[in-house]
């Protein structure tokens, strides 16, 4: 069954060959979805005869590609609301809070983890996210990490092994032994379930040498690296990500000119996670500096129970525009095509023929309203693989 989404006031295709500017913006547009993909996109006056089996009237509203959330931690139990309240009262965020979630996650059943992950993915879908990456990292034992990845694989499009989130509490006095576990038996158990390997390269988590050991072990097992880099302070994470050909360096809050130059000259995407800064009252990354240097930027929600408990990409778009120096166009591109680049996907994040049929109808005349109307649920309809959710 194919559908013609007709009378679109403004269509964001992210294909400059189809429309105006980097967003490939088409006014008075139409879109045909069928067989799971985009079959046609362009001015509604040029829709081919008999292009679809049914028609959906967009009523002059805007349509954009589904959001591509390239950084999420969805497999966990419990919450850290009291920790959030303490930060709002002035306490400083430190990476050790992750261990609170580790204890709750280990104690939960697989059915409980499955239900939580399903709920968060459904929540993300309702706000327009059609592609989502999900990490492990709250188990930190061989069995719990493998279990987390199995759960993630049932719900997410992309799965990342993050055994190197923090040092497991049992190894607090011997982090080298934990790195050996992460790069040995844990990797053996987890690699078959994942496409990516990640590490939290940060003071209080893993230093540069430890992060290199983790990532190179994953690469040897066929996993592609991603890096939590330079969130809490300056460190080697960004440079290591570029050196090892990581798909993305995520957070990228504290960077030097050399870090920016490295990102601009390589293929590593800078994935910015403004929900984390919102939830920790930390300084936001300077997206304008990165964009002006030619760095490819993505936006993601970083949904996790400690420092960014949101699945809303529209909220992150509003933060990026208000707090990080991005224009509305740049933020929408970063949350769609940018996220696809961070996942090395060319089938999502765009609405041009052959792309996956992931589209979001906004209850607004323009994509600009995503930043203009923060906190408002604008996703009026969502299609994933050509099927309305």
Image (cartoon, rainbow, N blue to C red):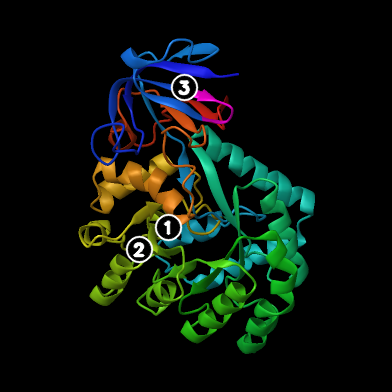
The picture quadrant where one finds residue 232 is bottom left
Label 3 sits on residue: 32
The picture quadrant where one finds residue 80 is bottom right
Query: Which mark sits nearer the N-terminus, 2 or 3?
Result: 3
The picture quadrant where one finds residue 280 is bottom left
Residue 331 vertical placement versus 266 (above, below) = above
Q: Are marks 2 and 1 in contact (CB under 8 Å)?
A: yes
Residue 191 seen in this snapshot? yes
Secondary element at tag 1 = helix
Nearest the viewer among 97 and 274 is 274
Magenta residues (range): 32-37
Q: Nearer the viewer, mark 3 or mark 1?
A: 3
Crowding at dot 3, Cα within 10 Å, few <14 / some 14-19 / many 20+, comes out as many
Residue 379 seen in this snapshot? no
Residue 83 lies left or right of residue 1; in this view the side is left
Residue 177 vertical placement versus 244 (above, below) = below
The residue at 26%/61% (across/down) is 290
Crowding at dot 1, Cα within 10 Å, few <14 / some 14-19 / many 20+, comes out as many
Nearest the viewer among 130 and 268 is 268
Residue 21 vertical placement versus 211 (above, below) = above
Residue 8 image offset from top left, x and y in percent: 36, 19
Q: CA distance from mark 2 to mark 1?
A: 8 Å
């Amino acid at each position: 069954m194919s559908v013609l989404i007709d009378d679109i006031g403004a269509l964001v295709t992210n294909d400059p060959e189809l429309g105006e500017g980097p967003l490939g913006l088409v006014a008075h547009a139409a879109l045909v979805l069928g067989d799971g993909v985009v079959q046609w996109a362009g001015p509604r006056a040029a829709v081919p005869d008999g292009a679809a089996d049914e028609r959906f009237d967009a009523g002059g509203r805007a349509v954009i590609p589904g959001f591509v959330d390239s950084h999420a931690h969805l497999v966990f139990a419990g919450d850290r609301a009291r920790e959030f309240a303490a930060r709002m009262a002035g306490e400083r965020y430190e990476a050790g809070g992750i261990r609170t979630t580790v204890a709750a996650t280990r104690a939960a059943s697989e059915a409980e983890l499955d239900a939580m992950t399903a709920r968060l993915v459904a929540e993300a879908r309702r706000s327009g996210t059609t592609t989502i990456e999900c990490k492990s990292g709250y188990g930190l034992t061989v069995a719990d990490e493998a279990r987390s990845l199995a759960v993630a694989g049932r719900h997410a499009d992309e799965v990342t092994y993050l055994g190197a989130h923090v040092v497991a509490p049992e190894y607090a006095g011997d982090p080298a032994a934990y790195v050996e576990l992460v790069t040995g038996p844990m990797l053996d158990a987890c690699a078959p379930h994942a496409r990516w390997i990640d590490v939290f390269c940060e003071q209080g988590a893993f230093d540069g040498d430890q992060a290199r050991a983790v990532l190179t072990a994953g690469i040897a097992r066929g996993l592609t690296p991603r890096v939590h880099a330079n969130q809490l302070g300056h460190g080697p994470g960004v440079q290591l990500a570029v050196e090892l050909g990581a798909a993305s360096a995520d957070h990228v809050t504290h960077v030097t000119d050399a870090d920016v130059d490295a990102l601009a000259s390589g293929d590593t995407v800078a994935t910015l996670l403004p929900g984390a800064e919102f939830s920790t009252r930390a300084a936001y990354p300077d997206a304008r500096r990165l964009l002006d240097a030619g760095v490819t930027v993505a936006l993601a929600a970083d949904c996790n129970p400690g420092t960014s408990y949101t699945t809303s990409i529209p909220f992150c778009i509003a933060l990026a525009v208000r707090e990080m120096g991005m224009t509305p166009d740049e933020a929408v591109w970063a949350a769609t095509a940018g996220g696809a680049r961070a996942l090395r996907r060319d089938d999502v994040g765009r609405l041009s023929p052959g792309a996956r049929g992931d589209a979001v109808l906004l209850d607004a005349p323009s994509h600009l309203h995503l930043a203009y109307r923060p906190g408002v649920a604008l996703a009026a309809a969502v299609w994933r693989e050509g099927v309305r959710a």
